[in-house]
Amino acid sequence: MEYTVKQVAEMTGVTVKTLHHYHKISLLAPCKVTEAGYRLYGKKELERLQQILFYRELDFSLADIKQALESESDRLECLGRQQELLYAQRQRADRLLVTIAKSIHSTMKGESMSTEELFEGFDKQGWEKALKPQQEYLKEKYNVDLTKKEIDPKKMNEQAAEAKRFMNSMRDFLRAKLPADDETVQKALTKHLQFLQEHGTQMDANAFLVSTRFFAQDDFHRNMLEDQQIGLSYYLLAVADKFASPQ
């Protein structure tokens, strides 16, 4: 039995436009095209579409999906690999759900979680996925490639916990309308820089000022900070400026 592109779209939830695009890039071709120009899909094409959708669930790019399908000798091999990847994804998701449950419980009780608990479940693959949008942005706009840098999940978890603690404190200081040169604010920055240096990141006052200036000027990074609190990127820059050039 053969199906039109409209019927395939209704069966699968994949839009007609997407199916046309898959055909255009030679990812999924119809089994035939009628004289009237209608695309028709058979069982083999539907099975290939299923495999494509499995890979999409795993966040594969279209180029990677095409390469994966071309490198696999048969459907069983492809499905077996996808099953392993989905099981691994589910295990990571289960660990993250436990972390979320603990976070909700701790927040409701007004308690703080330890660094280990805060980012439990974030493994190497989890961090690679989390960092991918930023890495792609830096590569495209500034030709800076961070993907070659080896990810240490334990170190990343520790740094993420510290970054969250520091940014939360800056957000709270901003909301409380504390001046950038307030002693409490400056001490928080001192503690943060000490943490970075103790954990292998060479970051002095001037380097931090350069970083915060970049964050305030770059759309991607400024929006990340502004989403936490309006004015945070500029407040952080003011705090860094006062720290680097105390009066």
Image: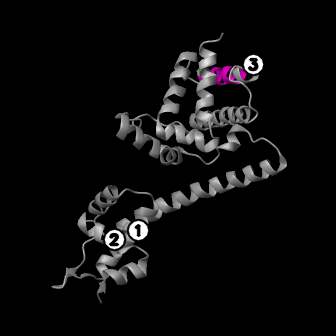
213 in magenta? no
| Residue under pointer 2 | 17
**Which of 137/178 is in front?**
178
- Which of labels 1 and 3 is toward the front? 3
The residue at the far right in this view is: 109
Which residue is pictured at 55% across the width and 20% down the height? 203
Distance in Å between CA atoms under marks 1 and 3: 55 Å
Residue 155 placement, left or right of 10: right
Residue at the spot x=55%, y=41% of the render? Answer: 224
Q: Secondary structure at mark 1?
A: helix
**Is there a contact, CB below 8 Å, between mark 1 and mark 3?**
no
Q: Which residue is mark 1?
A: 53
Q: Please, what is the three-letter code of the amino acid marked with disc 1?
A: Leu
Secondary structure that dominates the magenta span: helix
Residue 59, given in percent of the width and then of the height, sits at 44, 57
Give the answer, above or below, for where 47 lies relative to 131.
below
Q: Earlier in the sequence, mark 2 or mark 1?
A: 2
Residue 208 is situated, as x and y percent measured from the top left of the image, at 55, 22
Q: Secondary structure at mark 2?
A: helix
Q: Which of the 4 image quadrants contains residue 197?
A: top right
Using a 10 Å C-alpha cutoff, classify the residue at mark 3 as few (fewer than 14 neighbours), some (14 to 19) or many (20 or more): few
Q: Which mark is residue 72?
A: none
Please tell me whether mark 3 sits on a helix, a strand or a loop. Answer: helix
